[in-house]
Amino acid sequence: MNLEEFVKKLGLTINPKLHVVVLTGAGISAESGVPIFRGKGSMWENPEARKLASKAGPPWNTRETWEFYEWRRKLVSKCKPNAAHYTLVEMEKYFEDFCLITQNVDGLHGKAGSKNVLELHGNMWKGRCVRCGKIVSLPETPLKNIPPYCECGTALRPHVVQFGEPIDPNVLTAALTACSRAELFFVVGTSGVVSPAAQMPLIALQHGAKVVEINPNPTVLTPYMTISIRGKAAEVLPQLWKTFLLFSQKQEVKF
Ligand SMILES: [Zn+2]
């Protein structure tokens, strides 16, 4: 893999003023050991997960739902951000206009140090009141009380978008706006099958962005990408970022 060739192919001047958007999916978390939802090795292969999940359900603020979430939270609490997460922290510091959009609910971007993260599907370390809408940080596992309660006296639900539920319109609007402004867009570890995230790289392309895909396998998005790099996010992203920085320094010297 010759990353210099890839960067040349993009034909962009790398500088802090570029509008940059990154969309991350389950792949980046899986590299940190977070149990995945789809495909081989998914958490549904674990009978305990299936049993707990079968009892979780609307209105989602029940003991049964939180027992399933506590099972997941305990597993994720042992996972650490990887080199890809940390590279995104560096990128956020470098670019003045940088937007990180994630489909992951594990909070690993925040744990790595990313400041502004649009969490499309919420965050498993937060609860939301089904009555007053207050969002409460719940960083500890195990929780003292299951279900945890809001100060208004109502049981909280996990602040996570369940299958079939809509994404928070404020989060979605912010993400789509960023996509339409992007000049450089990275798709990292997402299979491109879950909407509306799957449309985001295509929206960026339509508005003239160069889109870079990083994924171990080809995806449905691959044919549309400006460049597509096969590999693990934790390996490719740090190297690619180093190459970008080398290019930006060359350009500074040149001009
Ligand atoms: Zn409340």
Image: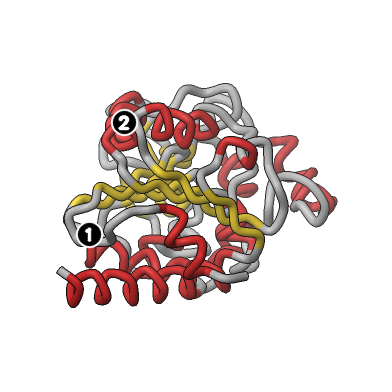
Assign the N terminus to one quadrant of the image. bottom right
Instruction: State the residue at coordinates (56%, 64%).
Output: 233
Q: Nearer the viewer, residue 179 or 240?
A: 240
User: Mark 2 — residue?
Assistant: 180
Q: Position of residue 30 (x, y in %)?
A: 64, 61
Instruction: State the residue at coordinates (46%, 55%).
Output: 9
Q: Position of residue 92 (x, y in %)?
A: 27, 61
Q: Amino acid at mark 2?
A: Ser
Q: Is residue 6 left or right of residue 54?
A: left
* Residue 119: quadrant of the picture: top left
* Residue 245: quadrant of the picture: bottom left
Q: CA distance from mark 1 to mark 2?
A: 17 Å
Q: Amino acid at mark 1?
A: Phe
Q: Label 2: few (<14), some or many (≥20) within 10 Å?
A: some
* Mark 2 CB within 8 Å of ligand 1: no
Residue 144 can be seen, yes or no: no
Instruction: State the residue at coordinates (32%, 41%).
Output: 150
Considering only order in the chain, which callout, 2 or 1, is on the residue closer to the N terminus?
1
Q: Is residue 36 above or below residue 157?
A: below
> Which labelled disc corresponds to residue 232?
none
Q: Label 1: few (<14), some or many (≥20) within 10 Å?
A: some
Give the secondary structure at mark 2: helix
Q: Position of residue 241 (x, y in %)?
A: 40, 70
User: Mark 1 — residue?
Assistant: 95
